[in-house]
């Protein structure tokens, strides 16, 4: 199956860096970016253990910066 999907990428004119694995990684990353739970991603990827999902998740620098910027640092904090 993996070689078949990779051949589809090649037939579409996409070169190195595109494979069934990269497609799964993109799928998982986009699900997480759209606020789906890791448990949902785990089930959709067909993994029996949640820790098997981590290698499929790519987080861009932009997403990291947005996550930090979205934190409300004043929520629930009291300073003396």
Image: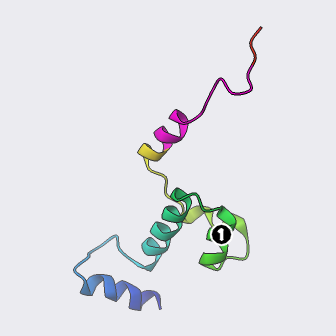
| Nearer to me, 9 or 76 | 76
Q: How many marks?
A: 1
Residue at 56% across, 60% down: 32
Image quarter in which the C terminus is found = top right
Colour option used = rainbow
Q: Position of residue 39 (x, y in %)?
A: 69, 67
Q: Position of residue 78 (x, y in %)?
A: 75, 17
Residue at 47% across, 92% down: 1
Horizontal side of 31 relative to 20 (left or right) equals right
* Residue 74 sits inside the magenta stretch: yes
The residues colored magenta run 64-77
- The image shows residue 69, relative to residue 25, as above or below, that is above
Q: Which residue is mark 1?
A: 40
**Residue furthest out toward the top:** 80
The kind of secondary structure element at disc 1 is: helix
* Residue 63 sits inside the magenta stretch: no
């Amino acid at each position: 199956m993996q070689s078949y999907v990779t051949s589809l990428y090649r037939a579409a004119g996409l070169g190195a860096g595109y494979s069934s694995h990269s497609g799964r990684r993109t799928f998982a990353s986009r699900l997480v970016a759209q606020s789906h739970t890791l448990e949902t991603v785990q089930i959709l990827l067909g993994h029996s253990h949640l820790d098997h999902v981590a290698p499929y998740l790519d987080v861009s620098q932009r997403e990291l910066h947005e996550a930090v910027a979205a934190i409300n640092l004043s929520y629930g904090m009291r300073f003396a």
